Image (cartoon, coloured by chain):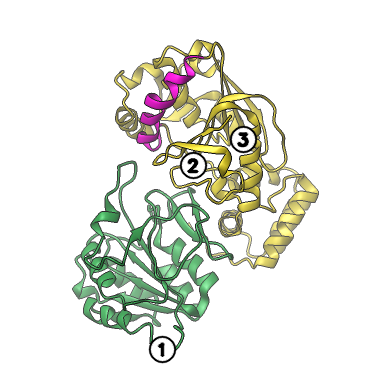
Chain colours: A green, B yellow
Amino acid sequence: MTKSSVDIVVIGGSAGSIPVISELIEALPSPFDFAVVIVLHRSKNVISEMEQILAVKRKEIIVKEPDDKEPIQKKCVYLAPQNYHLLIEETHSFCLDYSEPVSYSRPSIDVTFESIAEIYTEKAVAILLSGANGDGSRGMAEMIARGGIGIVQEPSTAEYPIMPQLALDANAGAKSMTPAQISAYIHTLNV
Amino acid sequence: MDTQTQLTAEELNEIIQLIYTQHGYDFSDYARSSLLRRVARCMAIAEFKTSYELKYHLINDKSFFAWFLETLTVNVTEMFRDPIFYKELREKVIPTLASYPIIKVWHAGCATGEEVYSMAILLQEAGLLNRTRMYATDLNPVNLERARQGIIPLKQIKEYTINYIKSGGTNDFSAYYTAQYDNAIIHKEYREEVVFARHNLAVDQVFNEFQLICCRNVMIYFNQELQNRAVHLFHDSLSPLGYLAIGIKESLLFTDIKEQFEAISPLTRIYRRKK
């Protein structure tokens, strides 16, 4: 097997994205040789069971919320903690940030996409799913500008098509795919 | 708001150096990813297109730096943020603090004081406030002035009341403030118990000994070296068996002094200094 050309896959989702995220995690190649980061809009100041909700049947895959300064490891699936922005340091470790919400959201998808684009450049894939606001478009532009790949859920397949539609309108270089096509794409990423 | 202003790593280094030589604040060991965002944000608000404009104002515009420092540092905070943390404090920490004749508490990086007053309320409810000395420090003088005033926008009070109840609070939350126009003002008896002072975790030293230090979501802005410095400083500022509370997603695991602490609430990241 050749060395993977992708080091990180980052998935942004808001309203209506959870079933698709679970499907994409299930579709990861076995074994997968990159890190997966999920940025999901959700409520704060509640005890979150999202790690359990996203847990999939494949026992080798554990979804975890990273601590600040935790090194990013391949073969791991990370979920941005509620109420923090998730950034990436040059040392390839996570860095949390509690500054103002962006697009009314913390975590903001734009913030993480932009940070990953800056550090991982063409070794990154960004996937934007269902949602009801404009988060993610700008980060997707940054991802594509730095040579990474931008994929957007085909709006007609999204429970809330606004977020993917805005991202497609703003990014001619983004690819529109159905969840099944995204799954198939992710499955080929190690080759 | 647009934070798209581009800034290279090299330009950021020059700005950090300039701030240090011109104004004496050392940001060289701050986490670069968040600092880059913050500087870009300042530039976007000031409508500077290039780092030259920023540098020009940092050097030549005396009043600019105060605004810049205030905007650069993250001042976002909440009362009773992470209610489960306050619940753990009520149940696991405060009863032990009760055994000290005088209790000293330090809030490091207190921002605008919301967490300081949350703690004051817990101590009051435990009957301990009158023998507690609270110190709240921040590097930003504007924050300290706001914190000292204890003024909280009324529109946030509903969320804080919910947080307070989730933290195990059983009182009527409005017993702690007076509503005036669009603001809530924390009652004087809480404000009077707090000493507000400037302290910079990047350069300043130990100034007292404490039974409890709270420094939540401050060290996330530091790199690992500065995190180490801060945690050593906290260790040296704690009495034996004193408590250190950090943010729920912060960890001592990546510091070289982790062996000197014991986690007493791993979920909410409350640690205790070993003897």
User: For residue B76, which numbered disc appears in the image?
Assistant: 2
Q: Quadrant of residue B127?
A: top left
- Measured along the vertical axis of the image, is residue B15 above or below residue B139? below
Looking at the picture, tell me which residue is in the foreground, A58 or A38: A58
Residue beneath disc 3: B234
Looking at the picture, tell me which residue is in the foreground, A28 or A110: A28
Determine whether label 3 and label 1 are within 8 Å by CB.
no
Residue beneath disc 1: A1
Chain letter behind tag 2 = B
Q: In which quarter of the image is residue A78?
A: bottom left
Which badge, 2 or 3, comes first in the chain's sequence? 2
Looking at the picture, tell me which residue is in the foreground, A151 or A104: A151
Answer whether residue B79 is magenta in the image: no
Q: Residue B110 placed where, x, y %?
A: 55, 34
Region in magenta = B80-99
How crowded pointer 1 is (Cα within 10 Å; few <14, some 14-19, many 20+) is rated as: few
Closer to us: mark 3 or mark 1? 1
